[in-house]
Image (spheres, rainbow, N blue to C red):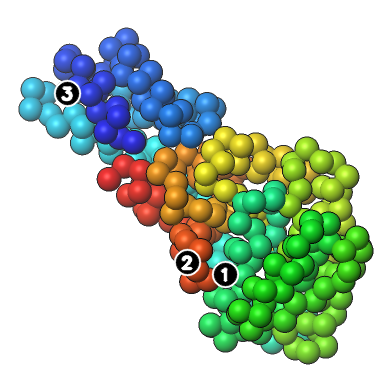
Amino acid sequence: MFEKIKSSFNKLTTKELTDKNMDEAFWDLQLSLLQSDVALEVAEAITEKVKEKLKGKRVGRFTDLKTLLEEALRESIKEILTPKSSIEILALAEENKGKKEPLVIVFLGVNGTGKTTTIAKIGRMLKKKGYNVVFAASDTFRAGSIEQLEEHGRRTGIRVIRHDYGGDSAAVAYDAIQHAMAKGVDVVLIDTAGRMQTDKNLLEEVNKIVRVSNPKLTIFVGDALAGNDAVEQAKKFNEAVGFDAVILAKVDADSKGGAALSITFATEKPIIAVGTGQKYDDLASFSPEWFLSKILD
């Protein structure tokens, strides 16, 4: 991303960076961010942050302008991506272990984002760390959804609690939690139907699942390849249901990186993990430093 704007900054020839001589350079920066799937409001915010950090700085004849500007850009992006508080699934599982009720996590998102596969990855991660896990097949709407989760359960060795299609999705979540309490299961991971963010009836069904299950953590699963669509989805889900954190799937196929930055800015929710492939172990923790190295190095 940074290479796209490097040439525009080299146009600056005066020894002091002012609003006037930065206008053209920062327009190119904003355009580059937009081309990298960064939402307009986010691109504007980053541009202003960088401008404030550079305003009034002296640029000598031998000043490495690229380094100066890259540092300001890195700092600005890092400020947006650094969460106010951290959320660690493994830490929550450890904290909850031994309690009478399981750790309950609900997953939200639209069809095709990789939500169900992400649930399987989380289940696999928890099981490898020694936690007992059960899946709740609360997507009782989409054809094949229950079988998909059951196949993941078979491959990972995790039991799936299910009802028939067309049934009460909240009842599935409730039964999974009751099963976990009876069997001493540590964690319940609840799948939900992939709803379009504009479907009010289906979003209300998600709200019902959340009310019944009272999750410790609600996670929005976004598609890194969806660009600004992922941002709009996250905003609508956050307004209609609310969530605590984000997992971004398909990051391995995304060369732009704008969705991660935009979702964090728009929702003020931390990205806690990213999907880096199709295998169950292809799940990595998210950090601002990792993201910066991906888009700027």
- Name which residue lies at 20% across and 36% down: 67
Q: CA distance from mark 1 to mark 3?
A: 49 Å
The image quarter in which residue 180 lies: bottom right
Q: Nearer the viewer, residue 198 or 167?
A: 167
Q: Is residue 189 in view from this perspective?
A: no
Circles 2 and 1 in contact, beta carbons < 8 Å:
yes
89 on left or right of 161: left
| Mark identifier at residue 59 | 3
Against 5, residue 83 (above or below) is: below
Q: Amino acid at mark 3?
A: Val
Question: Of the numbered discs in the image, which one, if any, rests on residue 282?
Answer: 2
Decide: few, some or many residues near mark 2? Use Cα within 10 Å; few <14, some 14-19, many ≥20. some
Crowding at dot 3, Cα within 10 Å, few <14 / some 14-19 / many 20+, comes out as some
Please name the residue shown 34% across and 36% down the image: 1
Q: Tell which residue pokes out farthest to the bottom in this image.
A: 183
Q: Which circle's residue, 2 or 1, is located before the other in the chain? A: 1
- Mark 1 lies on a secondary structure that is helix
Q: Is residue 172 left or right of residue 28?
A: right
Q: Give the x, y percent position of residue 66.
A: 21, 32
Separation (CA) of disc 2 from disc 1: 7 Å
Labelled disc at residue 121 = 1
Image spot of residue 75 (x, y percent): 36, 41
Q: Is residue 166 visible?
A: yes
Relative to 89, say whether 1 is above or below: above
Residue furthest top as drawn: 20
